[in-house]
Amino acid sequence: MSLYGIENLPYGVFSRPRGERRLGVRLGSSVVDLSPLGGLLAAPTLNPLLAAGRAQWTAARAAITEFVSRGADRIPLSDVTLHLPFEVADYTDFYSSEHHARNVSAILRPEAPDLPPAWRHLPIGYHGRSSTVVVSGTPILRPHGQLGDGEFGPCRRLDVEAEVGFVVGVPGRRIATTGFEEHVFGITLVNDWSARDIQAWEYRPLGPFLAKSFATSVSPWVVPLAALASREHQPQDPPPLPYLQPPGPAFDLRLSIDWNDTRVSSPPFASMYWTAAQQLAHLTSNGADVRTGDLFASGTVSGPERDQVGSFLELTWNGAEPVKLSDGSLRGFLADGDKVTISGTAIGAAGVEIGLGEVTGTILA
Amino acid sequence: MSLYGIENLPYGVFSRPRGERRLGVRLGSSVVDLSPLGGLLAAPTLNPLLAAGRAQWTAARAAITEFVSRGADRIPLSDVTLHLPFEVADYTDFYSSEHHARNVSAILRPEAPDLPPAWRHLPIGYHGRSSTVVVSGTPILRPHGQLGDGEFGPCRRLDVEAEVGFVVGVPGRRIATTGFEEHVFGITLVNDWSARDIQAWEYRPLGPFLAKSFATSVSPWVVPLAALASREHQPQDPPPLPYLQPPGPAFDLRLSIDWNDTRVSSPPFASMYWTAAQQLAHLTSNGADVRTGDLFASGTVSGPERDQVGSFLELTWNGAEPVKLSDGSLRGFLADGDKVTISGTAIGAAGVEIGLGEVTGTILA
């Protein structure tokens, strides 16, 4: 049974050789061209549909479902190029896995291994660079930077961060957690590539900058929230302040990380401490607005076990405990030529398992 | 003698009542409509001119100078509304005043009052929010946020940061310091409003987030680099790494901060440690690209004296030493109804003093 059946229908932007960009949905290992449906679905990017709001999202999904059911033409994925599915406005990244935050504190700040003081009171986040958000498959050039006092050169501790991204449709400010489904259209997989040596040297006191800004990869498919089952979030201690309540929906997404041909980790999104609805409420609580095309990412998804972590920093404990890949080679961080693929599945709204696509990238020197 | 004579001609976007947005240049207390010149100058925003590159910038300035000299129509500034002069792509903020960085360390981190370890090795910076960059005159709603464990409410320590912004015209990556004038079109004044109580609670370890993202105000006039005199930058110790050399031009800009009707500070831009060319080189050194409309700001401009600091955090030493305004009232941080105006002048390329416009904002509850 396909992970990309009619219960899923994630949106993407594709082109055929010498053709223009079109909206499509994935069906099995094909894409269905949505341009015959006209209107918002005839655009070359998701943004007009994103901006149209939830009633239009529902109507579009119904129309597409019927279109596909009637036997719309399928184009094999091997015949198309997939593009960034939407134009990114502001890109924000959170830090909402407690396992990840505790691991990072223990590895990078052994003198202060606890969670940062505000961590359980608010979803800590920061702004990233929009210009370098790229679609899955885009080669990742190893970044250069200052690696410490006196050194400038290619990053030696190049890492991944497996995350889930949330794509904002309807603009807003001071968005209550109960408004999440009115403003957020869907999800994408994110690899927030990270240069750990650059980060360690630059991040005090204003946070990560060049360690993250060289590339952020996203999957070519945006899975609409309507396709996903949700459930109640786990209790939080201490209880969040009123503007972060109720927590909003939790999603039972299962991610996987393949390092070349070896599956090295399977991070469980259900283990996240803060929900996406809380992240959006926090992000807009000061009066800041979000726009159509805003992307906010969950932060690295790490579960409690070593084979559930979302970064190689954690997987190899900062390189001290290398992993053995299936070809017998050992890795602490990424080598030139390495390919990393983050993929995911979820329980869909219809109760069947659905695919979240994948985000992949190969390191070039 | 006007600060806005023919030697200056900063660019802005204006509209008349019920009229459309047009490009203009400021001349005295008037604006000259550039749309009769056609082409890039007939656009409703600076972005097409920004993207066109230095040769076009030079040609446009020559054409405008001639147009103005021939006696082009002037529209009183009182008859127009001024808008954000360009569409902001990514917004980045630096931290390049040593006086400011030392003051902040002493005030906020008395246990570690020195400069951060990397401070003299690289221009520390972070990404900000593009969606909330607003034009001078936009009212500033006092932000809400978490003020510490258990508290959510209106910010009590609302502050300003007087900065100089640099507007990127031509996209690029790995831009050498010698390429600064090929990529950067001009400058704008920036007020990076800051909520110090929100900042103190949220910033570890990923930097300022909601403390800054509610609003960043810019002046309505972009002064082209061609209008500014430049000179050699002061020596830096230790010598910067090769990718940050030569330092590029220094600009002798004199800022002023008026708190309601009282001039409280006059920050000297010449005292900055890192140059804008070094900031741009650093920003793009990892492989990240800048786009047309990118805005990067200098960081708070503070000179060595108390009446030269660029923030009220420093001016009142975190509220401990309030300032007396001309109406006799005392201030630690901003009260509702307060108005702050940052203005500036420079020595122009023609040797005469020119105006940089002003960026103003009034605090609303």
Image (spheres, coloured by chain):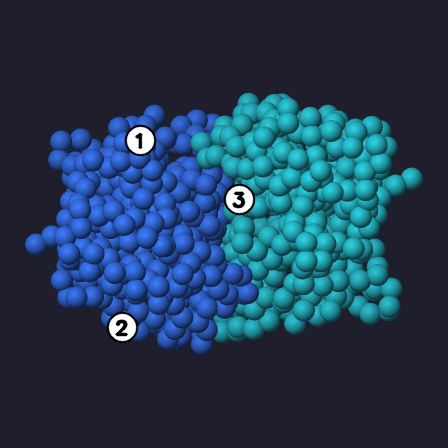
Chain colours: A cyan, B blue
Q: Nearer the viewer, residue B306 or A357?
A: A357
The kind of secondary structure element at disc 3 is: loop
Residue at (69% x, 30% y) in the render: A60
Vertically, is B178 above or below A87? below
Distance between mark 2 and mark 3 Cα atoms: 37 Å
Vertically, is B121 above or below B327? below
Q: Position of residue B162 (x, y in %)?
A: 29, 48
Distance between mark 1 and mark 3 Cα atoms: 29 Å
**Label 3 sits on what residue type?**
Ala
Mark closer to the chain start, 1 or 2: 1
Q: Position of residue A314 (x, y in %)?
A: 71, 55
**Label 2 sits on what residue type?**
Glu
Q: Position of residue A171 (x, y in %)?
A: 52, 32
Q: Chain of mark 1?
A: B
Q: Chain of mark 2?
A: B
Q: Chain of mark 3?
A: A
Q: Quadrant of the C terminus of chain B?
A: top left
Q: Quadrant of the N terminus of chain B?
A: bottom left
Tell me the tag on residue A89: 3
Residue to which mark 1 is pinned? B18
Residue to which mark 2 is pinned? B232
